[in-house]
Image: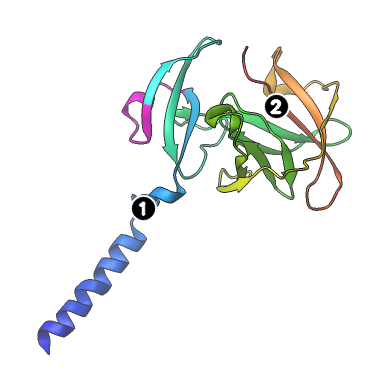
Amino acid sequence: MRAAVCGRIVALLGVVVTGCSPTMRSPVEQMVELRFWAGPEARGDHRVVNVSPHCCCSGEIAVARVSELPLPLATDPLEPELVVELTEAGGVLRRWPMPVDLIVAGVRDEQILVPLAPMLGAGTDRAILVSPGGAMVRSRVPPRLPEPVLYTCPVIRDFGESAYLRCFQFLDLSSGEVRRLAFQGPCT
């Protein structure tokens, strides 16, 4: 009897300790391999698989296995691209992180839809939905996605004088409302 009770306590403690551990890693099926700008400490980061020069821009790219995206403008060894939602007058409503060399294909409520086709090949419909806090969920690109409309960007301080900045009007995939997003296109 005592062995059975001790076994249950050990099992319970194992759940409590493992379940509450701040260093607990996400299950492998939640991990996605994505590209980010390599910050100063990227080579020593446990998430990083490889660091190499970017093919077209100055700087290095860190390929990392992540279960959530690092936040833009934060101090992290992995530096994402920035996506902002704008008001009609050009003010910033919200910000999202986005992997390097990818684009936004749609917006649904508070999530942006980012296709993974540039990384995985043109034949895939795999994507991620990203929240402003960096949480991501695996998804698929809908077969009949409304085309975004390019428009002239206002001055957006977050992007400085970037030659890669693009602004688009998207129709929200849930509500149908017009949403204005700005982000830098991939380097070419």
Q: Which amino acid type is shown beneath numbered disc 2? A: Phe
Residue picked out by circle 2: 183
Q: Position of residue 46 (x, y in %)?
A: 33, 35
The amino acid type of the residue labelled 1 equals Pro
Vertical position of residue 6 compared to residue 97: above or below: below
**Observer-nearest of 81 and 108:** 108
Q: Is residue 48 magenta?
A: yes
Q: Are marks 1 and 2 in contact (CB under 8 Å)?
A: no
Element type at marker 1? loop
The residue furthest bottom is 1
Residue occupying the point 57% across, 32% down:
72
> How many neighbours does mark 1 have within 10 angstroms: few (below 14), some (14-19), or many (20 or more)?
few
> Where does label 1 land, which residue?
22
The colour scheme of the drawn protein is rainbow
Quadrant position of residue 85: top right
Q: Is residue 37 left or right of residue 123?
A: left
Magenta segment: 38-49
